[in-house]
Amino acid sequence: MAKKENAVRVLFASFEVDPFFKSGGLGDVAGSLPGYISTDSFDIRVIMPKLAQIPDEYKKKMRFLCSFEVKLAWRRLYCGLFHMRRGGLDLYFIDNEFYFARQQAYGEADDGERMAFFSKALLESALHIDGFSPDIIHCNDWHTAMAPVFLREQYMKCRKLKNAKTVFTIHNLKFQGIYNEFLLPDVLGLSDTPAERQLRSAGDSINYMQAAVRYSDVITTVSPSYAGEICTPYYGEGLDWLFRERRGVLRGILNGIDYKLYDPKNDPALPACYDADSIAKRTANKKALCAELGFSYDPKIPLIVMISRLTEQKGLDLLKAILPRLMEEKLQLAVLGVGDRAYEDAFRGCAAAHPEKMAAVIKFDPALSRLFYGGADMLLVPSRFEPCGLTQMMAMRYGALPIVRETGGLKDSVVPYNKYTGEGTGFSFANYDAGELFDCIKTAVKTYSNKKAWKQLQTNAMTTDLSWRSSARAYRRLYRELLK
Ligand code: ADP
């Protein structure tokens, strides 16, 4: 798309970008949102590390642009910049084999140094992209958190960057980049600067995300409810005081899902494709899913699934607590997920004791997840906290009704069933309480037996706009506001 002369220029930085590298929701968002933001009035370019994990088919398509030096305290480091055009977007890849050609993308002993390098290198890259001076630098999660700090402390004399505004988006508040203070002089080179005070946190530690929240012009997170919640101690992960302080520039913009990738009308993983006008075709998918899980198919018995990382955040303690009671109900339950051993064992144990009612599929399998969305009747998401959550949206798009706890993005995306008006796109409960989850499932199961009400709910869910369209509009509005 030809960009207008006065287009808003955005550099969108993320450590993960699907399909190059993804370990969770961040990769999904960075892989799809920029494409929806891009118009002839918005020139948005994406930058990520050239990770060893990127498949060769993509590496082959990258073109070397230039190389330059990046300074990190006393270090003088090589940085290569590669480029690719894909889906109408310009994508840039930061090359440094020492930092990015690792066995695993995360969890290295020097992650603090690697992310500092990425943050610095993305600013340096902006200086080396011909004809592109970013008006906005949009950083995502702690991996990029040092960029707004370096920008203000070290780049204010650069013509290309001195007027750039910064947006910092929090997808996951659990990981903040907390390190020992020795990184201040040795890696960041920021001792005895104003940044030192903004970085220092408890004891002798420093916190990258804390500094980003202080230095960025706007902070966003991925749902309006979560933006409010992180200002409270229960959800704030130790930074609630800071979010309260920065409330004036804190926004919540709900994520969307990629309608091209997640489309029940055109999904090769489904035996039968369908849309909101042909919901009955889902039966073939449910039959296939039951066969896969070793269940007998019975249209009167609802099939409830969960597709999730198996970690405490996802409300698995609640589900574990009510498993014995659920096994006495007329329903089938299947979990697709990998994660903490204790949960894997609990679900496997229950499945072994009740093979006709419970299945535990302990693996990460995107194709199978689509059969789950397209064949199941309900999807459980009883999370303790959920910044946005994508599975409930995918389920709605595929006509499986979500059963969620009213928190974060779950609250913002699922309208609870109102039996008097027939309104709703799912079922919800308020408190982190196993009894409430059980009652909510019972209500959903009871509603399932009312075929007319159920079909209405499925139609409501499938016709809800969960695409990136309105979120992309909100980001464009935000960029424009920042430049006023
Ligand atoms: P989070 O990012 O906290 O893990 P989200 O709901 O935002 O949770 O995103 C989860 C994504 O990962 C969804 O696309 C979901 O379908 C996918 N997913 C989770 N577990 C599995 C699994 N075992 N197999 C396939 N896909 C999975």
Image (cartoon, rainbow, N blue to C red):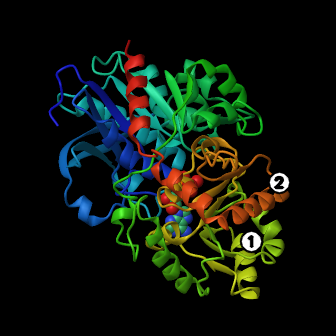
The residue located at (41%, 60%) in the rendering is 277
Q: Nearer the viewer, residue 399 or 341?
A: 399
Three-letter amino acid code at the position of disc 1 = Ala
Q: Quadrant of the C terminus?
A: top left
Q: Is residue 337 left or right of residue 394?
A: right
Q: Is residue 477 above or below residue 394?
A: above
Three-letter amino acid code at the position of disc 2 = Asp
Mark 1 or mark 2, whichever is nearer to me: 2
Q: Nearer the viewer, residue 245 or 350?
A: 350
In which quadrant of the rendered view does residue 278 lie? bottom left
Task: Work out whether residue 74 can be spotted.
Answer: no
In which quadrant of the rendered view does residue 236 lie? top right
Q: Is residue 94 left or right of residue 431?
A: left
Read off the residue under disc 2. 433
The residue located at (47%, 62%) in the rendering is 104
Q: Secondary structure at mark 1?
A: helix
In this rendering, the count of numbered labels is 2
Q: How far apart in space, not on screen, are marks 1 and 2 (Cα)?
A: 20 Å
The residue located at (63%, 49%) in the rendering is 422
Q: Is residue 136 left or right of residue 289?
A: left
Instruction: Return the residue found at the far left.
Output: 2
Q: Secondary structure at mark 2?
A: loop
- Crowd tier of the residue under label 1, counting other residues whose Cα lies within 10 Å: few below 14, some 14–19, many 20 or above: few
Q: Is residue 423 above or below residue 266?
A: above
Instruction: Return the residue found at the far top.
Output: 484
Read off the residue under disc 1. 342
Residue 41 lies, in percent from the top left, at: 24, 26
